[in-house]
Amino acid sequence: MATPHINAEVGDFAETILMPGDPLRAQFIAETYLENVKRVCDVRSMYGFTGTYKGKPVSVMGHGMGIPSCSIYVHELIKDFGVKNIIRIGSCGAVHDDVKLMDVIIAMGASTDSKVNRIRFANHDFAAIADYHLLETAVNQARAQNVAVRVGNVFSADLFYSPEVGLFDKMEKLGILGVDMEAAGIYGVAAELGAKALTILTVSDHIKRGEKLSAEARQHSFNEMMNVALETAINL
Ligand SMILES: O=P(O)(O)O[C@H]1O[C@H](CO)[C@@H](O)[C@H]1O
Ligand SMILES: O=c1cc[nH]c(=O)[nH]1
């Protein structure tokens, strides 16, 4: 039955869903990679699609920007629509000298300045981590496709434009590979509701060097990440 944010029916989504922040990236993926595609929801133009990839069912849907937005969609997809595996496919900023635009990062864990996981966990630190099977499958699929991936810790920030002087230097020192705005929240929702989650990111900005991809490139050019995510989705 439809929820306040997803106007689909039970059974409309596959067990595994790919989720970018941008609903137009979701549409691009559905139109470019999936066959037999049906648009299954469109509330607030947050488009969701289900189709097949190499004959196996896969869904793709946007989740918006920031932990509050993605938490609503991921919660309802798991609880109301039976989705079992969430694979976020996002963009991120880099802070390390040796990480460059278009590099692909797999978030083994996600640090954050958001309080959501403390709210879930009696104000204690919660280690927001990827599901190991999803992680291992993604690494294996990347190797099979000769896609170089970095695997490690990312940082999910509440603010895209951070006023905290020096925060990015601290991140670099602590080995944070990329900065996004959702991974830690999605890992928290998945843990709370007993689902599996993974985040794969493509570097769209170098925060320290001031380098940026265009909006068009963020929507249409992340093919290596899409291929790794789609092959992961059908090899679980
Ligand atoms: O490209 P997406 O998946 O939206 O991810 C990143 O891009 C947005 C900010 O530009 C935030 O949602 C951030 O996490
Ligand atoms: O959250 C994000 C996403 C892309 N680039 C950034 O700098 N931060």
Image (cartoon, grey):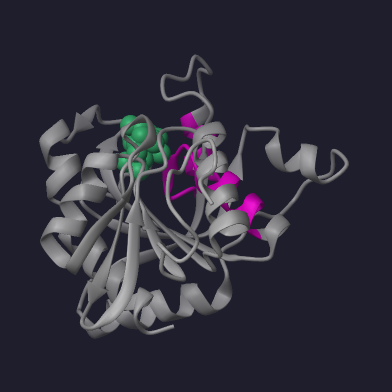
Disc count in the image? 0
Q: Quadrant of residue 35?
A: bottom left
The residue sitting at 48% across, 33% down in the picture is 66
The residue sitting at 50% across, 41% down in the picture is 70
Query: From the viewer's perspective, is 120 left or right of 234?
Result: right
- The x, y position of residue 37, in whole percent, is 20, 63
Q: Is residue 34 visible?
A: no
Q: Nearer the viewer, residue 80 or 96?
A: 80
Dominant secondary-structure state across the stretch colored magenta: helix
Query: From the viewer's perspective, is 164 left or right of 208?
Result: right
The residue sitting at 36% across, 83% down in the picture is 140
Query: From the viewer's perspective, is 224 left or right of 87?
Result: left
- Placement of 58 over or under 112, stated as above or below: below
* Quarter of the figure that contains the C terminus: bottom left
- Placement of 35 over or under 98, stated as above or below: below
- Placement of 24 over or under 85, stated as above or below: above
The residue segment tinted magenta is: 168-190
- The x, y position of residue 153, in whole percent, is 52, 54
- Whether residue 184 is in magenta: the answer is yes
- The x, y position of residue 227, in whole percent, is 22, 69
Q: Is residue 33 visible?
A: yes
- Whether residue 56 is in magenta: the answer is no
Q: Nearer the viewer, residue 133 or 230?
A: 230
Query: From the viewer's perspective, is 98 left or right of 127?
Result: left
The residue sitting at 60% across, 49% down in the picture is 75
Q: Nearer the viewer, residue 6 or 68?
A: 6
Most extreme residue toward the right is 122
- The x, y position of residue 195, in whole percent, is 61, 65
Q: Ligand 2 appears in which quadrant?
A: top left
